[in-house]
Structures are given as structure tokens and as C-alpha cells.
Image (cartoon, rainbow, N blue to C red):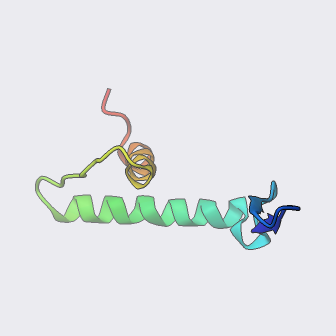
Amino acid sequence: MNARTDNGLLQPTMHPPAHLSNTHLDALEEEAIFILREVAGAFERPTLLFSGGKDSLVLLKCAEKAFGTGR
């Protein structure tokens, strides 16, 4: 959600929209972890491509939660 400033530019608001609560985000994270585990179990040598972008970083964190850090 954005708010207009005096000069007409959009400025992000400080509060996330109500439909993006932590509960909702937690459920999405749990679903992503579940899917990662299912896909990894279906293949002999599953691979995760990593570009270093925002999407890849989120996927990497979900993979760490699903499989551990490998240490």
C-alpha cells in the first residue's frame, strides 16, 4: 500500500496491508517447505538454481529450513 506525498509521488506506508499478516506469510513458507521436500523426495539428485536475487534468497532460506544447512 502506498500513500501520495505533497509532490504527488507515491511513498510506501510503514504498515503492511492486513491481508499480508505474519500468519499468512508463515502459511506460505510452510507450503513452500512442504513442496521443496516433496520434489526433493521425487528425484535422485534434485538441484536448486541460485542467482543471488531476492527470489533465490527466499528459496535458499526455505531450503535451509527444509533440509538444514548441511553442516
Image point (39%, 48%), residue name: 53
Could you say where residue 15 lies in the image, as x and y percent from the top left?
81, 58
The image quadrant of residue 44 is bottom left
Q: Residue at x 75, y 63 (%)?
A: 9
Q: Identify which residue is drawn at 23% across, 60% down.
A: 41
Farthest residue, direction top: 71
- Left/right of residue 22 with respect to residue 45 in the rendered view: right
The residue at the far right in this view is: 6
Location of residue 22 in the rendering, given as x and y in whole percent from the top left corner = 70, 59
Of the pair 57 and 45, the residue shown nearer to us: 57
- Vertical placement of 52 versus 20: above or below? above
Point out the residue furthest to the front here. Answer: 7
Question: Which image quadrant: the C terminus?
Answer: top left
> Which residue is at the front of the view, 15 or 58?
15
Left or right, residue 32 beside residue 12: left
**Residue 25 vertical position relative to residue 64 in the rendered view, above or below:** below
Q: Quadrant of the N terminus?
A: bottom right
In depth, the one of 40 and 7 nearer the eye is 7
Q: Nearer the viewer, residue 51 or 69?
A: 51
| Residue 6, image x, y percentages | 88, 62
Residue with the most extreme left position: 44
Query: For the image shown, how many numbered marks are present on the structure?
Result: 0
Query: Which residue shows up at 30% across the image and 65% down it?
Result: 38
Tell me: residue 5, above or below residue 18: above
